[in-house]
Image (spheres, helix red, strand yellow):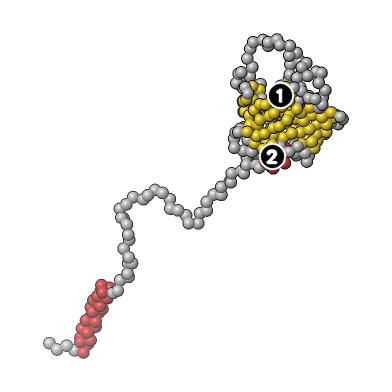
């Protein structure tokens, strides 16, 4: 059968419509796909480590430096510009003195001057300490007492006074001939004015009681005390002398190396 012109045009249009979806389908299957990039490394089944990843922008916390231990000059300077406890004759009730540039004066007009300290390690802690002399002048009379100042590595102060003196020199009394540092303490060379025995000797002649002893500074119940280690274990501060020395034995008993009840008994 022969088709007319209108039928031929309709048939051609139908072929065109059918062909378009085929071309679109073909283009969708054969078009270029994006490159997925390199394959991931590592085991995708591995469990997370549980540790947070380091933050490259984080900064370490600043550390506080350890305080520097004082030098002998630091301890000397501190002692020359601070409060002292002073005991007349080394055995009386202490009074407070305020020193400035190594000098002080008490309410009674007596003056005080600090001398150069002897460097050592009195308590064996590895920090420098000083045994420092201070001289009191009262008219024509004078006395010199030696106090230990312990160096401190921390806190607000550079040194701490041991309030019990370890040696003395008096106008007409005991004389400290030499004070030298030893391992964990000091050696003190005295000439003592002996009661009764030396009563007839003039002040210029001095006493007859020769004594060399060694002391250390011990912490007992949170406080510092001088303790004698040689020639025998005993109290290391200044001792009141007997006024009798008549040869009578003292009553039997025991003493302590320092006031606290927990101190070593001797």
Pinpoint residue 169: horizontal percent, then vertical percent: 76, 28
Graded by Cα atoms within 10 Å as few (under 14), some (14 to 19) or many (20 or more), the crowding at tag 2 reads many
Q: Which residue is mark 1?
A: 210
Q: Residue at x 82, y 26 (%)?
A: 204
Determine the secondary structure under disc 2: helix
Mark 2 vs mark 1: which is more N-terminal?
Answer: 2
Pinpoint residue 225: horizontal percent, then vertical percent: 65, 27
Q: Where's the N terminus, which quadrant?
A: bottom left
Graded by Cα atoms within 10 Å as few (under 14), some (14 to 19) or many (20 or more), the crowding at tag 1 reads some
Residue 11 visible from this viewpoint = yes
The relative height of residue 64 versus residue 194 in the rendered view (above or below) is below
**Label number found at residue 75:** 2
Q: Quadrant of residue 79?
A: top right
Q: Residue at x 68, y 11 (%)?
A: 250
Q: Residue at x 81, y 21 (%)?
A: 201
Q: Left or right of 224: which side holds 62?
A: left
Q: Tell me, yes or no, whether the two marked residues, 2 and 1, touch with CB atoms within 8 Å.
A: no
Pinpoint residue 182: horizontal percent, then vertical percent: 63, 33
**Label number found at residue 153:** none
Pinpoint residue 188: horizontal percent, then vertical percent: 68, 29
- Nearer mark to the viewer, of 2 and 1: 1
**Viewer-side residue, 127 vs 106:** 127
Q: Quadrant of residue 20?
A: bottom left
């Amino acid at each position: 059968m022969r088709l007319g012109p209108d039928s031929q045009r309709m048939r051609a249009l139908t072929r065109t419509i059918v062909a378009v979806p085929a071309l679109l389908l073909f283009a969708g299957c054969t078009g270029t796909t994006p490159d997925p990039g390199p394959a991931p490394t590592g085991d995708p089944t591995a469990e997370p480590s549980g540790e947070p990843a380091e933050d490259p922008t984080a900064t370490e916390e600043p550390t506080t430096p350890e305080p520097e231990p004082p030098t002998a000059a630091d301890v000397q300077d501190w002692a020359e510009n601070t409060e002292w406890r002073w005991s007349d004759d080394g055995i009386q009730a202490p009074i407070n003195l305020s020193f400035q540039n190594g000098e002080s004066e008490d309410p009674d007009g007596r003056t005080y001057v600090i001398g150069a300290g002897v460097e050592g390690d009195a308590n064996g802690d590895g920090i420098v300490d000083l045994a420092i002399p201070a001289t009191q002048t009262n008219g024509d009379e004078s006395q010199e007492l030696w106090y230990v100042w312990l160096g401190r590595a921390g806190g607000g102060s550079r040194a701490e006074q041991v309030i019990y003196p370890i040696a003395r020199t008096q106008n007409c009394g005991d004389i400290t001939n030499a004070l030298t540092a030893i391992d964990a303490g000091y050696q003190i060379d005295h000439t003592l004015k002996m009661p009764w025995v030396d009563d007839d000797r003039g002040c210029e002649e001095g006493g007859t009681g020769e004594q060399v002893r060694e002391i250390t500074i011990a912490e007992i119940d949170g406080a510092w005390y001088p303790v004698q280690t040689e020639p025998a274990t005993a109290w290391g501060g200044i001792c009141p002398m007997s006024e009798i020395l008549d040869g009578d034995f003292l009553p039997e008993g025991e003493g302590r190396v320092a006031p606290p009840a927990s101190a070593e008994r001797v």
